[in-house]
Amino acid sequence: MTNKEESTNKTLRLLMPQWQCGNNPIYFLGAQLLNWLAPDTNAIQEEVPISLMEEGQEVEKGIFARRALLKQLHDASAIIKKHSPDRIIVFGGDCGVELSPIAYLNDKYDGDVAILWVDAHPDVNSPEHFENQHAHVLGNLLGIGDEEFVSAVPKLVNPDNILYVGLNDRQPSEKKVMEQFNLRVVPPEELIEDSLAVLKWLEEVKTSKVFIHFDLDVLDFTEFRSILFANPVAYEKMKAELPKGSSMETIIRVLQDVAKAYDVVGLGITEHFPWDAYALQNMLQRLPLIGDINKEDKPSVNWIF
């Protein structure tokens, strides 16, 4: 891309610290930290207002906090529509934050967008199997799941344009959807030496644009511990039971290789789960002079993936 093209392309940097899709308020903190840690850019910056209130968090139509999530989805869509960007950067929050940006870009470029779903999970579940909407989002983009979430997708994503990168966990209900749409997978072991499997797929699919969804839980949690799996209380148990994820350097190399060869129009980074920062925040809230010395609440986590 030339400097002139860069200057005429509008990029929106969207902070969406949504937590209700995974029912873990720590994702609110995680998104804020991601945005703070990320390099400054010339992008337009907007934040989607997200409620931390507990009201309205009941399960409706099989989805936890459905009404709050729909409002936040529409708020995100309104912000994106207001700016009509050519490119979008998203700092989440849970994976549900990707619904509006991908729906917008897929429609803007008339389906000419490949989606790299860099994630440990397929996220094609549905309310009858799982109440946390962060596991539904890619299914919604394909046209399955709750009708109001699906209606926010003006042009459904072509399943041939989706590639899972680093996927290493899936439920039986998700396997059925993956088989139904014949979704392709590059597992972690195929990424260790080089990025050829991903680049070859992109060459075959022949889209001109790429959106990268990067859920941090694709990373090896023994190397990067700010993800849900790395619960300090159950750390050794999780190490023994869960499949090994990808190294950080492997994922960096894959995404750099993709960006050197293809036009990346979107990058979403989600599910930052900063265990130590969360514990520190709780401690500071309970100390003299800066907090409430009568506060006894300890950090709590929802363990439903």
Image (spheres, rainbow, N blue to C red):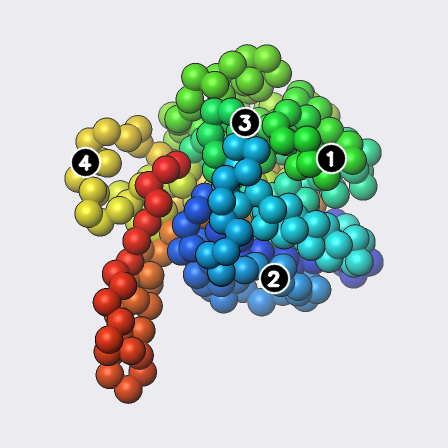
Query: Dividing the picture into quarters, in which one does residue 171 lie?
Result: top left
Circle 3 SS class: loop
Q: Position of residue 185 (x, y in %)?
A: 51, 22
Residue sitting at x 43%, y 33%: 120
- Whether residue 256 appears in this view of the structure is no
What is the spatial separation of the Cα atoms under label 1 and label 2, in whole angstroms?
21 Å
Q: Earlier in the sequence, mark 4 or mark 1?
A: 1
Residue 78 appears left or right of 55: right
Q: Which residue is mark 1?
A: 151
According to the picture, the residue beneath numbered tag 2 turns out to be 49
Callout 3, which amino acid?
Answer: Ser
Which quadrant of the view contains residue 205?
top right
Look at the numbered discs 4 and 3 and tell me whether their residues touch, using CB distance below 8 Å: no
Query: Closest to the observer: 96 or 200?
Result: 96
Residue 242 in view, yes or no: yes
> What residue lies at 57% left-to-right and 33% top-to-bottom?
61
Residue 236: x, y in percent? 17, 39
Q: Which residue is mark 4?
A: 237
Q: Earlier in the sequence, mark 4 or mark 2?
A: 2
Task: Name the amino acid type tagged 4.
Answer: Lys
Q: Between tags 4 and 3, which lies in front?
A: 3
Badge 3 vs badge 1, beta-carbon distance below 8 Å? no
Mark number displayed over residue 84: none
Q: Residues within 10 Å of mark 1 (few under 14, many from 20)?
A: few
Q: Residue at x 30, y 28 (%)?
A: 243
What residue does disc 3 label?
126
